Structure formats: C-alpha cells, structure tokens
Image (tube, rainbow, N blue to C red):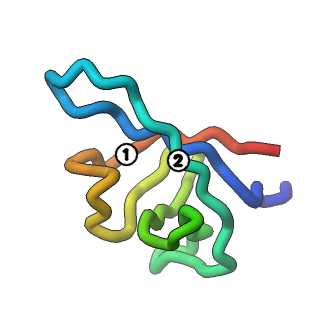
Amino acid sequence: MDTPQRYAVTLPGTPGGHAPPEVVIVHATGERSADGAPVYADAAGTFRVEIRAGVALPLDAAPEAGRHTCLHATALP
C-alpha cells in the first residue's frame, strides 16, 4: 500500500469557545518518527505529526494542537 503524500488534520476549536475546527494540510517530510511512522509537516514546518491509521499524533509541543494528543487525519489525493 502506498503511503499518502498529504493529509488534512482537523484541530478542534478551543473548548468552550464554540469556535469551528481548523483544518491544516500536512505533507510527507520523508522522515520517520522514533516508532517508524511517517512524519508530516505543514508548509511552515512548525506543525509536525506522525500519522497512524487516520490518527495524527503531534510530535512537538505545537501551539496549534493545544492540549490535544490525538487528531483526526484524512488522506488527500
């Protein structure tokens, strides 16, 4: 199975803020996480995640992810 080159990662709005979720497009970096999963990053390279089975796990303490440790990821064509 081919590894997708990009994903849409959904970041929930601030709890209690009633803000809509934000969608960030991440692209494959060619790197692997310590666990061997592909690493993806946004265009600026500040939001980095590993993606496993439709779940994006933030690698850095990215402010966009806030306190969320598991984020929904959808493969894009």
Q: How many numbered marks appear?
A: 2
Residue placed at 66% from the left, 62% from the top?
27
Q: Which residue is mark 2?
A: 24
Residue type, label 1: Cys
Considering the image in quadrants, where does the C terminus appear?
top right
Q: Which percent across, then down, holds residue 68?
A: 27, 45
Q: Which percent across, then down, holds residue 22?
A: 44, 36
Q: Is residue 71 visible?
A: yes
Residue placed at 37% from the left, 45% from the top?
70
Q: Secondary structure at mark 1?
A: loop
Mark number displayed over residue 17: none
Q: Nearer the viewer, mark 1 or mark 2?
A: 2
In this view, 76 is above or below 42: above
Give the side of residue 39 with respect to residue 7, left or right: left
N-terminal-most mark, 1 or 2: 2
In this view, 11 is above or below 61: above
Q: Is residue 54 visible?
A: no
Residue type, label 2: Val
Query: Label 1, label 2: how many angstroms apart (C-alpha)?
Result: 14 Å
Q: Which residue is mark 1?
A: 70
Q: Secondary structure at mark 2?
A: strand
Q: What is the crowding at mark 1: few (fewer than 14 residues within 10 Å), some, or many (at least 20)?
A: some
Residue placed at 22% from the left, 33% from the top?
14
Q: Which percent across, then down, holds residue 48?
A: 46, 66
Give the side of residue 34 with respect to residue 60, left or right: right
Residue placed at 59% from the left, 46% from the top?
53
